[in-house]
Image (cartoon, helix red, strand yellow):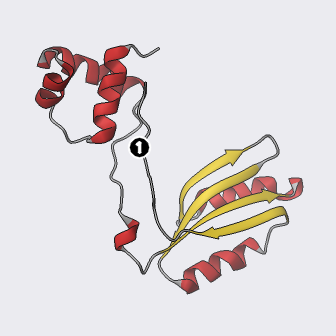
């Protein structure tokens, strides 16, 4: 269970993971030593990795999509293996209890997207939905209470 200081640290890191411990400690009104100790605890417990966010709005040539796929039970395992191994998948989520997938896929051009769609024809689906992302309105902004 995270205490108040742990949550504050996570929120500071989510807003700017490059912010110095010294500045975080000033904002949190604690010593730098205590801030380092809290960061170490948080890093070792809930932080998987530090990464960057790409502003895809500044890359109009990129084709971004969200998919919802619900494969037939006979193709569930093969579909999952295909999705997990695809270089085009940015994030992949299992949804509901029926083996459906929700994912973001990124393609450099229409031919790459078409190739991906052709590969999907090798599987049987109860549902297959593709949505094209035109603009990021809000992204990675969740903070802990």
Q: Number of marks in the image?
A: 1
Image coords of residue 55 (percent x, y): 35, 63
* Residue depicted at 44% across the width and 38% down the height: 142
* Residue depicted at 14% across the width and 16% down the height: 33
Q: Quadrant of the C terminus?
A: top left
Quick one: 120 or 104, which is closer to the camera? 104
Quick one: 90 or 80, which is closer to the camera? 90
Question: Which type of secondary structure does the marked residue at label 1 adopt?
Answer: loop
Image coords of residue 20 (percent x, y): 15, 34
Q: Is residue 121 left or right of residue 73?
A: left
Image coords of residue 121 (percent x, y): 78, 75
Callout 1 environment at 10 Å: few (<14), some (14 to 19), or many (20+)?
A: few
Image coords of residue 14 (percent x, y): 34, 38
29 in relation to 139, above or below: above
Q: Farthest residue in the front direction?
A: 137
139 in relation to 111, above or below: above
Q: Is residue 57 left or right of residue 71?
A: left
Q: Farthest residue in the bottom direction?
A: 111
Q: Which residue is mark 1?
A: 141
34 in relation to 89, above or below: above
* Residue depicted at 16% across the width and 15% down the height: 30
**Where is residue 76, by image quadrant?**
bottom right
68 in relation to 41, above or below: below
């Amino acid at each position: 269970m995270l205490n108040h200081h742990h949550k504050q640290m996570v929120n500071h890191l989510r807003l700017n993971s490059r912010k110095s411990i010294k500045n975080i400690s000033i904002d949190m009104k604690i010593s730098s030593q205590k801030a380092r100790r809290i960061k170490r605890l948080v890093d070792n417990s809930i932080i998987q990795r530090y990464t960057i966010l790409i502003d895809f709005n500044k890359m109009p040539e990129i084709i971004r999509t969200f998919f919802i796929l619900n494969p037939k039970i006979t193709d569930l395992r093969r579909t999952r293996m295909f999705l997990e191994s695809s270089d085009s998948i940015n994030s992949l989520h299992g949804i509901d209890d029926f083996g459906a997938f929700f994912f973001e896929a990124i393609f450099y051009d229409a031919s790459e997207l078409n190739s991906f769609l052709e590969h999907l024809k090798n599987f049987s689906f109860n549902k297959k939905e593709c949505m094209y992302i035109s603009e990021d309105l809000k992204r990675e902004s969740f903070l802990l209470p």
